[in-house]
Image (spheres, rainbow, N blue to C red):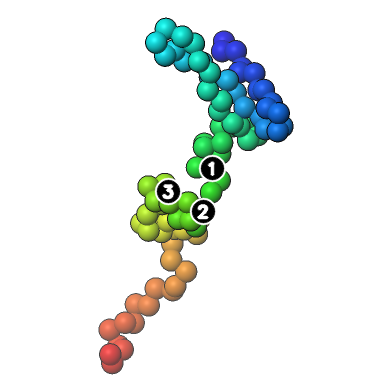
Amino acid sequence: MKKKKKIHKDKNGREFIKESYFVGGKMKFRRIYVIDGIPAEEFYEKNATDIDFYMNGDYHLMSSENESNNRDDEQIGGKSDLPDNEDDEDLPF
């Protein structure tokens, strides 16, 4: 069973997790800031919209047009809202 990492607070009240690593045989620590117990970068990726990604220059995180259309279809139920017209052959244009 993994032990849950302890959440510390800095002098400004921001929460972070200490992550240790070694450089040249010496142990150093890095602060990973958290929001609601989730690392800040992961929280941003999950909750930001395409406009947020665009404004911050994170184009690689934006969903493509095809993916967004597929999501819209899934929300609707995969069917078009337009009725099927079988009488298209009778139209003069």
Can you give x and y, in whole percent of width and height, for residue 89 in the image?
27, 84
Amino acid of disc 2: Asp
Whichever of callouts 2 and 1 sits on the residue coming sooner in the sequence is 1
The residue that disc 2 covers is 52
Q: Is residue 69 left or right of residue 28?
A: left
Q: Of helix, strand and loop, which one carries label 1?
A: helix
Q: Nearer the viewer, residue 23 or 76?
A: 23
Q: Quadrant of the C terminus?
A: bottom left
One can see residue 74 in this view: no
Residue found at the far bottom of this picture? 92
Q: Are marks 2 and 1 in contact (CB under 8 Å)?
A: yes
Q: Quadrant of the N terminus?
A: top right
Seen at 46% across and 58% down, the residue is: 72
Cα distance between the residues tagged 2 and 1: 9 Å
Q: Quadrant of residue 33?
A: top right
The residue that disc 3 covers is 58
User: Against 72, is 10 above or below?
Assistant: above
Amino acid of disc 1: Tyr
Cα distance between the residues tagged 3 and 2: 8 Å
The residue that disc 1 covers is 44
Seen at 60% across and 23% down, the residue is: 17
Can you give x and y, in whole percent of width and height, for residue 75 in the image?
50, 55
Q: Nearer the viewer, residue 18 or 84?
A: 18
Seen at 37% across and 47% down, the residue is: 60
Whichever of callouts 3 and 2 sits on the residue coming sooner in the sequence is 2
One can see residue 16 in this view: yes
Seen at 51% across and 53% down, the residue is: 52
Q: Is residue 64 left or right of residue 7?
A: left
Amino acid of disc 3: Asp
